[in-house]
Image (cartoon, grey):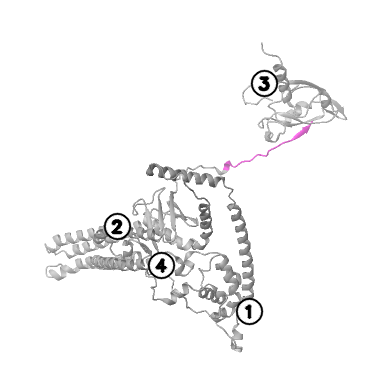
């Protein structure tokens, strides 16, 4: 198991970006972005709590390593099983702990910074309006009608700004990205510069000289709020609108089983494109099932194990040159011998696959019959009957538990044959059965989620198998997508390889057809005898 | 039949056929049917090599009729009838030229593919000197 290289790569990546970007993140931060701070983190985490249950949580662990023979022993299932955690799980848990602590610190820090900036920006116009009254109230001209009208305008514009900022920025964080979000950083800097310059001007020209023209001051405050609204418009265009129009077609392929999907993305940076792709991954790709890959691995092992190379000449000359030459000639000899050998593994594969197909179909037909028969045992009670005979009445959960044993064995055998038994626990199957009974679903509808593997999101969280993703890219991840750019999204078990292609520039010309130009003639072919 | 380029002179190897009209009741008949013409659809002509050829073709020969005995074959293209050109006429004009009531003999110039090949073959058997 390649645990060492996977995690060492991850930690190297995280260490590097921590060092270089920590200073950068403190100095340039976003404004009004309390909830986006997770984007400045270095690992792409999806929004679930990062800490997995620790060793002490035995009940959950017990469920996961439960005995697979629940089909035969449905009446008495206990949670007594050993805690068997592999080395990989331990390493993963400690890594999660360490990262979650680090990430939370940074997240809270950037959150507080953003809140402070937001408050500063919101209170600035109010301060501009209030300070003259506090500092030189006697000298100030009275506020006429136009001036008071401007008060209303300031109030409403501030309210609109507040709502707009809440709508755009105050959303739950979707992920934590490796590098800071360039556009948000730019916008934060812009706003900061803007507010600072306004304060400078105010301080020099108004506070120092104690200007009496209050209407001018109010107009100054209104212009500030207007400009903030325009910056918000800029934020909408840069952050939301720019990437809506599709520009690139990306092809995402899973490295283990070749499952491939194509998506259309707009102009995004590589890290944002990776985030969009991962969100689609959880919704579209069928769940990753490592049990299905064991067959090809065993075939590969058989290929290698078939030949052994012996060196009969003995250790002779110069070690370095000879060993290089020997390795080269060894591999060539192996390839030649493999080509000459009468390889019948294709035959075995064919018959094995045919046999497997037959077996799956047989099990499936038994399963379908068992489920249909089980569903005939229960009937929904009508309203009138409910009042009349309150005898042996069951709620959906009890009804599910009542009919489950008759189909459990067939279902378990089917799941074992299709190597899906680890995806569905007995508890989840009973829950699903109760759900189907409640909603009047047919047996076929109940079975559908076991016959075809659904998207990863539909399974319970333990089976998602990846929440920490690493973005491996040759270009900097804040660069935009380009035609032909590729990157890899790696998680513990597999990786997603992404390639992009630009949608071509289309040159269209027009041709006008006069509606009167549609004329037709008969095609004649006569034959005359003379 | 040589390929036909509009506006350029047409060269073809032709055969002279003279048909005596046969009186059948009130009509003088020649014993064959024609198809084609500049007002017809040339693409549906099964006998022409070039499907844009709008000439007049012999589409049917009555067996043991006057045309059959004179040597006219199915698929022949009529180039001239009694001196009148048949390569650029409408179907009706062709019919009229063939069925003039005051003529009882028609002299046709017809061409067919086998004529060209026969000429080439005969030329080829004599070595050039």
* Observer able to see residue B112: no
Going from the N terminus, do you reach mark 2 or mark 1 first? 2
Q: Do the numbered discs 4 and 1 sit on residues whose CB atoms are within 8 Å?
A: no
Q: Do the numbered discs 2 and 4 sit on residues whose CB atoms are within 8 Å?
A: no
The residue that label 2 is drawn on is A16
Task: Using the rendered image, report if marks 4 and 1 lie on a common chain.
Answer: yes
> Rounded to the nearest whole Å, what is the CA distance between mark 3 and mark 1?
93 Å
> Rounded to the nearest whole Å, what is the CA distance between mark 2 and mark 1?
63 Å
Q: What chain does badge 1 belong to?
A: A
Count neighbours of disc 1 (C-alpha within 10 A) and say few if under 14, some if 14 to 19, many if 20 or more.
few
Question: Of circles 2 and 1, which is in front?
Answer: 2
Residue A279: name its quadrant.
bottom left
Name the disc covering residue A200, or none. none
A469 part of magenta stretch: no
Left/right of residue B56 with respect to residue A42 in the rendered view: right
The residue that label 1 is drawn on is A377
Magenta segment, which residues?
A: A516-530
Going from the N terminus, do you reach mark 4 or mark 1 first? 4
The residue that label 4 is drawn on is A89
The residue that label 3 is drawn on is B11
Residue A243: name its quadrant.
bottom left
Q: Quadrant of the N terminus of chain A?
A: bottom left
* Observer able to see residue B61: yes
Count neighbours of disc 3 (C-alpha within 10 A) and say few if under 14, some if 14 to 19, many if 20 or more.
few
> Rounded to the nearest whole Å, what is the CA distance between mark 4 and mark 1?
43 Å
Seen from this angle, which residue lies furthest right? B25
Q: What chain does badge 4 belong to?
A: A
Question: Of circles 3 and 4, which is in front?
Answer: 4
């Amino acid at each position: 198991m390649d645990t060492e290289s996977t995690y060492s790569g991850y930690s190297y990546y995280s260490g590097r970006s921590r060092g270089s970007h920590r200073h950068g993140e403190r100095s340039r931060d976003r404004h009004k972005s309390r909830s986006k701070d997770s984007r400045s983190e270095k690992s792409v985490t999806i929004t679930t709590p990062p800490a997995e249950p620790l060793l002490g949580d035995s009940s959950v662990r017990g469920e996961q390593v439960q005995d697979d023979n629940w089909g035969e022993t449905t009446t008495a299932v206990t949670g007594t099983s050993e805690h068997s955690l592999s080395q990989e799980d331990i390493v993963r848990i400690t890594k999660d702990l360490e990262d979650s602590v680090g990430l939370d610190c940074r997240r809270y820090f950037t959150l507080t910074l953003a809140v402070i900036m937001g408050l500063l920006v919101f209170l600035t116009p109010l301060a501009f309006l209030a300070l003259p009254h506090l500092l030189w109230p006697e000298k100030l001209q009275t506020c006429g009608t136009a001036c008071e009208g401007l008060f209303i305008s300031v109030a409403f514009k501030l309210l609109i700004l507040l709502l707009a900022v809440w709508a755009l920025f105050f959303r739950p964080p979707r992920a934590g990205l490796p590098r800071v979000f360039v556009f948000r950083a730019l916008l934060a800097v812009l706003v900061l510069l803007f507010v600072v310059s306004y304060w400078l001007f105010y301080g020099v020209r108004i506070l120092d000289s104690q200007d009496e023209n209050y209407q001018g001051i109010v107009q100054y405050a209104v212009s500030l709020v207007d400009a903030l609204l325009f910056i918000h418009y800029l934020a909408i265009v840069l952050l939301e609108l720019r990437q809506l129009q599709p520009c690139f077609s990306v092809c995402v392929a899973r490295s283990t089983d070749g499952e491939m999907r194509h998506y259309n993305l707009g102009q995004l940076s590589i890290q944002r494109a990776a985030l969009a792709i991962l969100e689609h991954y959880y919704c579209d790709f069928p769940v990753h099932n490592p049990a299905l890959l064991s067959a090809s691995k065993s075939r590969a092992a058989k290929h290698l194990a078939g030949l052994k190379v012996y060196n009969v000449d003995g250790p002779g000359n110069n070690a370095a040159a000879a060993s290089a030459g020997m390795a080269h000639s060894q591999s060539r000899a192996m390839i030649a011998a493999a080509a000459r050998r009468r390889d019948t593994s294709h035959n075995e594969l064919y018959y094995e696959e045919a046999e497997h197909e037959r077996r799956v179909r047989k099990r499936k037909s038994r399963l379908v019959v068992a489920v249909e028969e089980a569903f005939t045992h229960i009937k929904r009670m009508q309203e009138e009957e409910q009042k009349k005979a309150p005898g042996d009445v069951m709620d959906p959960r009890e009804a599910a538990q009542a009919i489950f044993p008759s189909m459990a064995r067939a279902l378990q055998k089917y799941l074992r044959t299709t190597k899906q038994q680890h995806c569905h626990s007995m508890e989840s199957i009973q829950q699903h059965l109760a759900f189907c009974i409640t909603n009047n679903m047919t047996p076929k509808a109940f079975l559908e989620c076991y016959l075809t593997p659904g998207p990863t999101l539909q399974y319970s969280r333990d089976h998602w198998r990846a929440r920490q993703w690493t973005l491996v890219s040759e270009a900097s991840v804040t660069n935009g997508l380009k035609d032909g750019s590729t990157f890899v999204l790696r998680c513990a078990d597999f990786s997603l390889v992404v390639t992009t292609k630009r949608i071509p520039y289309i040159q269209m010309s027009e041709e006008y057809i006069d509606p009167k130009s549609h004329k037709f003639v008969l095609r004649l072919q006569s034959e005359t005898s003379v | 039949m040589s390929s036909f380029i509009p506006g350029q002179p047409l060269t073809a190897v032709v055969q002279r056929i003279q048909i005596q009209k046969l009186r059948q009741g009130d009509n003088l008949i020649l014993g064959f049917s024609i198809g084609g013409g500049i007002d017809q659809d040339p693409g549906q002509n099964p006998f022409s090599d070039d499907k844009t050829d709008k000439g007049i073709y012999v589409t049917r020969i009555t067996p043991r009729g006057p045309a059959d005995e004179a040597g006219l074959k199915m698929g022949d293209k009529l180039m001239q009838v009694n001196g009148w050109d048949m390569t650029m006429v409408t179907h009706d004009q062709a019919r009229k030229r063939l069925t003039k009531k005051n003529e009882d003999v028609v002299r046709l110039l017809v061409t067919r593919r086998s004529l060209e090949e026969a000429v080439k073959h005969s030329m080829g058997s004599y070595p050039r000197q």
